[in-house]
Amino acid sequence: MFRRHFLVTALACAALPLIPAAAGAQSVSDNLRAEFQAREYVPRRVIQLELQLMELYPAEVDGTYGPMTEAALIAAAEAIEAATGGEYSFDLSDRAEASRFLDLLRAEMFMFMYDDGFEG
């Protein structure tokens, strides 16, 4: 009896860290989708173009949000944080931070992440 109770308790405790991670992943997805779709068509295309120039978005620049756009946005946030030594870090599970990240992408603040063809 004790062994079974211990096993059930141990399994339940082991699963606890997974619950917030799954909820956090969903909120990142929801935040990015909501903030991306809240922008006009042209800014959405500019964001996708920036992702494409960073070689993170291989699809057609169409201004629509889908799994490839989401994956590219998450990869871009991670790559920018790594490239800047944490100077630019984005908590995409926070909607305001997701919005700020998209605003900075739209403003082409991360041109250092790709070769624009003007430097030798």
Image: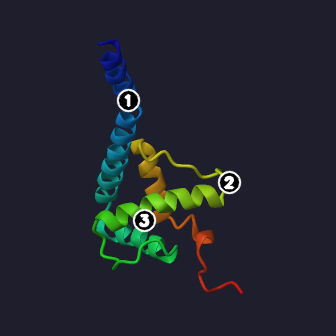
Q: Earlier in the sequence, mark 2 or mark 3?
A: 3
Label ID, residue 85: 2
Q: Is residue 73 above or below residue 54?
A: above
For residue 49, which quarter of the picture?
bottom left
Location of mark 3 (residue): 72
Q: Is residue 16 above or below residue 53?
A: above
Spatial separation of the CA atoms under disc 1 and disc 2:
31 Å
Q: Earlier in the sequence, mark 1 or mark 3?
A: 1
For badge 1, the amino acid type reads Leu
CB under 8 Å between callouts 1 and 2? no
Location of mark 1 (residue): 16
Name the element at disc 2: loop
Q: Earlier in the sequence, mark 1 or mark 2?
A: 1
Please tell me which residue lies in front, 29 or 15.
Answer: 15
Q: Residue at x 42, y 73 (%)?
A: 57
Q: Residue at x 59, y 81 (%)?
A: 116
